[in-house]
Amino acid sequence: MSRCSILAARRTAVVPRNGVFKDMALQDLAQPVIAQLLKDAALSPNHIDELIVANAVGPGGNPARLCALASDLPQTVAGLTIDRQCVGGLDAVLLAKSLIQSGQCNIVIAGGVESYSRRPLRYHTFSDGSAPQAYEQAPFTPWPDRDPLMSQAAQTLAEYLNISQAQQDAWAMESHRRASATPSDFLEDEIVLLAGQSRDKFTRSLTSRHCQKAKGICGTITAANMAVAADAAAFLIIANEDIARGYTGQKIEILEGASLGDDPQMPGLAPVSAMEQALRKSRLTIADIDHAEIMEAFAVQAIACQQKSGLDAKKVNRYGGALARGHPIGASGAILATRLYHILRRDRGIGLTAIAAAGGLGTALIAKSA
């Protein structure tokens, strides 16, 4: 099977909902990122065969088509939207890999975009004429008693693995510390300037005092150790082996990936299964991983993935994670892949990224410097 490489990766800053991105449509968030990607890779829009966009809380329809047209891609680029909630952005990259390896495409732009600020109100309607009933979360299993809110699932995971609030708060504080210490030139390579934002807005000096005063959400889960809802976009250019071979810029080879389901009541453990499968397919062990980007929707999820997989904590989220950025659901997996791309460009080696989603889903990707 032919190899696939990432030629370029970019994202916007991550901005908490109702911030400076609050009035931007999905395509307005995506277009500057796609334009910069093409410039980085020295590609014409005519080189692009497909655009895959993950989106979770948008209005429906086909946001990928809007993004393709707004980005002046050829009208032949239909645009494919996927919704797998939090894992969608990383699944978009794996789907691009599959399209290329099957010979259907040569170059694909893949990633995700989310405007939590502009998410539509949703209602259940009833045939008996009763008033429509608003709802916040779609069902992710057919069994109401096995379809927890994500904060409840995080608390169940904390109890199952005996992970204390103090441990979760410590992870969150370290995430903010690492994010605050990220070199400016690293972020300049990663982030496309939009609405004056060149750094993630939520990153701050988080202290134990702040954590103690944080609003409680569910048991040990608080506003300090769970990621804030946010707006952002992130995209990557993935190309086949022949194109990558002739590419003079820095590229990262995608080795393997895995996307699978697990226990819906503890989705935080699903990435561990995905990591194990991706490692087996790559004929690697966890000891071979030099850099890891693990989603921090909740601190307890990241801790669980690090502990259960055997990853060295020093290799995980070296520049901070979603706790210090925010969680733009459909874009989060693509942000992880973008971060991994830029780390491997600079420091080389083998990298892994993994993320969980509602319904008990987990996705992982392994890549290496070329």
Image (cartoon, rainbow, N blue to C red):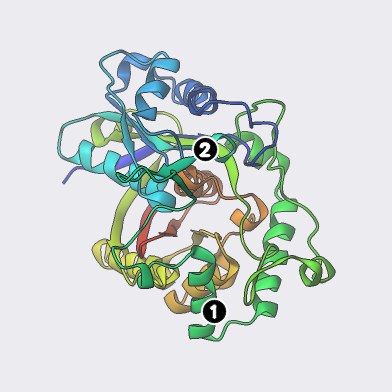
Residue 119 is labelled as: 2
- Whichever of labels 2 and 1 marks the residue nearer the N terminus, that label is 2
Q: How many marks?
A: 2
Q: Residues within 10 Å of mark 2 (few under 14, many from 20)?
A: few
| Residue 22 percent across, percent down from the top left | 64, 32
Q: Quadrant of residue 147?
A: bottom left
Give 61 or 101, whichever is nearer the viewer: 61
Q: Is residue 370 visible?
A: no
Q: Quadrant of the C terminus?
A: top left
Q: Secondary structure at mark 1?
A: helix
Quadrant in the picture for residue 353: bottom left
Tell me what residue is drawn at x 44 percent, y 57 percent.
351
Depicted 45 relative to depicted 102: above or below:
above
- Disc 2 to disc 1, how far (Cα)? 30 Å
Is disc 2 placed on a helix, strand or loop?
A: loop
**Residue 188, percent from left and from top:** 65, 34
The answer to whether any part of residue 103 appears in the image is: yes
Give the x, y percent position of residue 110.
Answer: 37, 35
Numbered mark located on residue 95 in the image: none
Describe residue 236's horizontal placement relative to residue 283 as left or right.
Answer: right
The residue positioned 68% from the left and 38% from the top of the image is 185
Q: Position of residue 9 (x, y in %)?
A: 48, 36
> In screen coordinates, is 91 left or right of 39?
left
**Disc 1 residue type?**
Ala
Judge whether 37 appears above or below 126 on screen. above
Residue topped by disc 1: 158
Q: Amino acid at mark 2?
A: Arg
Looking at the image, which residue is at 58% across and 82% down?
163
